[in-house]
Amino acid sequence: MNLNQIHNVYFIGIGGIGMSALARYFMAANKNVAGYDKTKTEITDALEALGASIHFIDDYTDISAQYFNSQETLVVYTPAIPKDHGELNYFFNNGFKVLKRSEVLGLITQNTICLAVAGTHGKTTTTSILGHLLNECDVEMTAFLGGISENYNSNLIQNGNKVSVVEADEFDRSFLTLSPDYACITSMDADHLDIYGNAEHLKESFVSFSKKLKPKGKFFIKKGLPLDGITYAIEDDADYIAKNITIENGTYVFDVQTPNQNIQNLKFNLPGRHNLSNALIALAMAVEFGCSPIRLASALASYKGVKRRFTYQIKTDDLIFIDDYAHHPEEINAVHQAVREMYPNQKVLAIFQPHLFSRTKDFADEFASSLEKFDQVLLLDIYPARELPIEGVNSQWLLDKIDNPNKKLITKSDIVKEIQKSDIKVIITIGAGDIGAEVKNIKENLSIAS
């Protein structure tokens, strides 16, 4: 398909974080953009402010007439959209070009030098770091992010079209539509078992992704994962090593040993060894791409993070409120490590909203183990997203598995009241559902109280 012949792009699920990045891209390319989503959000508001036409009822008669020209219109959808969706089926049944988000991303990137970041954890942060590094080094690039960059207040970083930086998403095997020149895998923990069935099938998919690399491409792999490539590690033997790590005023200061040189006194402001690992692989890919280590050091120090990735909402001497997107036990463990490293003498209260019935069922014991490490746990009902309930799988069932006397099942409307009842001064909200929509209210109420 020649995207130059497309004048109209219609998105079904336009408010999704990956979909909205594509919408921004096409608007920047002067295409007409419209779409549907079931819920009005800050993301849809921002797209409408840029000129996108969006509606929130599944009814194709609400779509502007120009989008019914099947020769000039591309329809993009996310796999999260149910198969019986009216608008989606209308376009499927009437001769339109209808592609998944991942397929469109594959089309956009196929004529670029593509740097792809894969892994069950760390994709969004690593991709945003890499995009920021290349942008600060004046590379003519476009980065598609799975989160809102704090540096750019956007999920799209655009400085040209010769190079593309993308998240290679394992969900629905979407990353197999890519053919990158540079690719990394940050982690291969079991996840999305509703799609893959078991961890071995997930691993096989990552192996298939590694074989999508273009000839003479460069493949990076976290040390310890069962694939061959350029390795990276924290304080361990690898091709790229972060070492001599210290913390100064909440900032990591460290050196990186590359295959050819030692880059000293790098600074990185995100807490947690998992984020330091993300920074290391982004740096390694940028070095191998050909960026100057001196410019990379300055760029890394200026990186601010991604919204909802260990994002400070309140940071005073008397109160810390952090919000994080973690929705897998290993991600919660990483959040716990980070908050303990930053605040070793403080108690920590965690408010967690499980995401998906299937994930909760598959990793219930692991979730319990990761959550019980906090000093107090407030648990919300499971956010279903695309799923129907599973009998016997609910938050009370998960709560019963958590070995911590300071635990409670609450509703979203009770969050502020329960925080205010606690004497704990380090608060963290965790989850990938709609708990993020509660953050503003929590922040406002805690700010008044403090």
Image: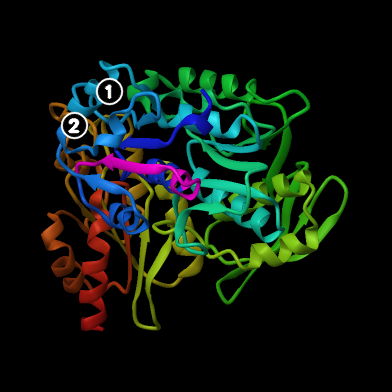
Query: Is residue 161 rendered to the left or right of residue 311?
Result: right
Residues tagged 1 and 2 counted as in contact (Cβ below 8 A): yes
x, y percent for residue 35: 29, 40
* Residue found at x 75% / y 41%: 238
Residue 305's place in the image compared with 72, above or below, is below
Identity of the amino acid at label 2?
A: Tyr
Q: Give the camera-side residue of 138 and 392.
A: 138
**Going by the picture, which residue comes out furthest to the right?**
260
* Residue found at x 63% / y 26%: 226
Say whether residue 316 is magenta: no
Element under label 2?
helix
Circle 2 sits on which residue?
A: 60
Say whether residue 36 is magenta: yes
**Residue 175: which disc?**
none
Q: CA distance from mark 1 to mark 2?
A: 9 Å
Mark 2: few, some, or many residues within 10 Å (few <14, many ≥20)?
some
Q: Which color scheme did the rendering employ for the protein?
A: rainbow
Identity of the amino acid at label 1?
A: Phe
Q: Give the camera-side residue of 395 and 104.
A: 104
Q: Give the camera-side residue of 433 and 378.
A: 433
Please give the range of residues in magenta: 25-38
Circle 1 sits on which residue?
A: 91
Residue 44's place in the image compared with 328, above or below, is below
Query: Is residue 14 rendered to the left or right of residue 331?
Result: left
Element under label 1?
helix
Mark 1: few, some, or many residues within 10 Å (few <14, many ≥20)?
some
